[in-house]
Amino acid sequence: MMAARPEAVVIGASAGALEALSIILHVLPGNFRMPIIVVVHVPPDKRSILAELFRAKCQLSVQEADDKEPIAGGTVYFAPADYHLLVESNKTLSLSSDEPVLFSRPSIDVLFESAADAYGMSLIAIVLTGANHDGAKGLRTVVDAGGAAIVQDPDSAFADAMPKAAIEMCPRARVLSLQAIAQYLKEV
Amino acid sequence: MTAPQPCEKVEDIEIRLLLEALFLKYHYDFRNYAMASIKRRLKQAREQLGFSTFSALQERLLHDPSMLQRLLGFLTVQVSEMFRDPSYFKAIRENVVPHLRTYPSLKVWIAGCSGGEELYSMAILFREEGLEDRTQFYATDINQDALEAAEAGIFPLDRVPLFTENHRKSGGLSSLSDYYQAAYGKVTFDKTLRRNVVFSDHSLVTDAVFGEMHLISCRNVMIYFDRDLQDRALGLFKDSLARKGFLGLGAKESLRFSRHAGAFTDFVREERIYQRRAE
């Protein structure tokens, strides 16, 4: 079966996330078509400043995800600290304070699994640098639903545990450098 | 006859039927909850209760009432923490309490109290501020097990350092250790803290107003609802609040999109504390 035209991008990143995300997000053009929904592991007791940090440098619109917000193309959504971020089947975002998964809230697995359910084959999921195993199971769910899986090349990652775990769970994932991931997104 | 929607997955059909069964048989209504979380929780329930499909779980639920409480355990219980978001409790203490002091008697509703973390936080705050004796607390939840846990006031010892740190950051005037006794890896909170508390089964989805409140705190409950259900709950809070009464929501919840927004003013905006208008 032909791959469906992708409709959304989800990204998970942990240790080393800021630099890795900068390389990808800063170069995407303002007319980028898809929404990009991002979970970065951040400490639960802080208000996340990710959206503010990236807003200044991105051509895309950047914001912290709000509960029940309709997902818009060309927008980057960051999960707020201490909440899981999920995609509903009607393409809205929702938040939850369910228990941390793999000690993480927000959890990459939770985002990926709900996005796989909502977007199926039309999803691109990307696992970046990180020192834990979050995202591997979620990426597998994305692949099983027919979506595209991309993992940052572990050799180029600030922390290689998370990309390695993802590759182990999804041996057929594309393994790319950060620059190549940015290029892929621009061309897809 | 038209063909069925090709995108409706069997599992999604099963989940809708399961929630319908839960409502028709037991009157617990999760049909208007945000589905992504519900689905995740139901999958955990299916796995851990040992069913291969949601249909099988539904059959058992309909014929074996003992399955109800076990399923509700997955659908409703969540672990919170005492003084979660200390800045919220600080704002209650510094901004709301001075207004509450002007009333001779107070009613405070902790809606969706779960295991009681927020209730005990509020009760300690009210004791520290000298308001406890004039206050009637209502702690409500739809889950009987959660209500019993809240009433017992027992928490794992390993969570206490976090609770203590939160309490301190919230502007606590005493030491949290004044309020509990530790033994066997657990802490038991002082039972006098719940002297003025009524624990009650109440649903924001199906139940009505039961009293006139001066403060309602309902945090991280409505994020599980869809927009319509959020509106119903907010309408219930509006009708339950005394004029100029206060409503505190979770850090990522707001009245912004609600049709009841006009009945409230921002009181401490960044902490999502609202005040019912006087008219």
Image (cartoon, coloured by chain):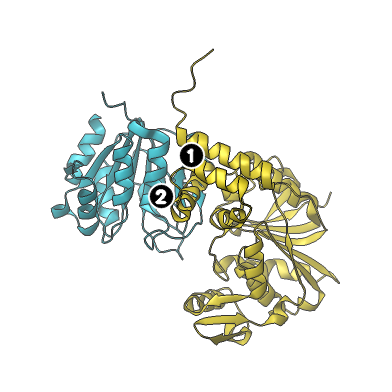
Chain colours: A cyan, B yellow
Q: Helix, strand, or loop for circle 1?
A: loop
For the residues labelled 2 and 1, the Cα–Cα distance comes to 12 Å
The residue at 36%/38% (across/down) is A60
Residue B137, image x and y in percent? 75, 68
Please report contact status of discs 2 and 1: CB closer than 8 Å, yes or no.
no
Label of residue A110 in the image: 2
Closer-to-camera residue (B253/A98)? A98
Q: Amino acid at mark 2?
A: Val
In the image, farthest residue toward the top: B1
Give SS at disc 2: helix
Residue at 44%, 27% in the rendered image = B7
- Label 1 is found on which chain of the structure? A
Q: Quadrant of the N terminus of chain B?
A: top right
**Which residue is more in the foreground, B263 or B188?**
B188
Percent across and percent down for residue B23 are 66, 43
Q: Position of residue B215 (x, y in %)?
A: 74, 62
Give the amino acid at mark 1: Glu
**Residue wearing tag 1:** A88
Residue A37 drawn above or below residue B164:
above
Judge if badges 2 and 1 mark residues of a common chain. Answer: yes
Residue A66 visible? The answer is: no
Answer few, some or many: residues within 10 Å of disc 2's Cα (few below 14, many 20 plus, some between 14 and 19).
many
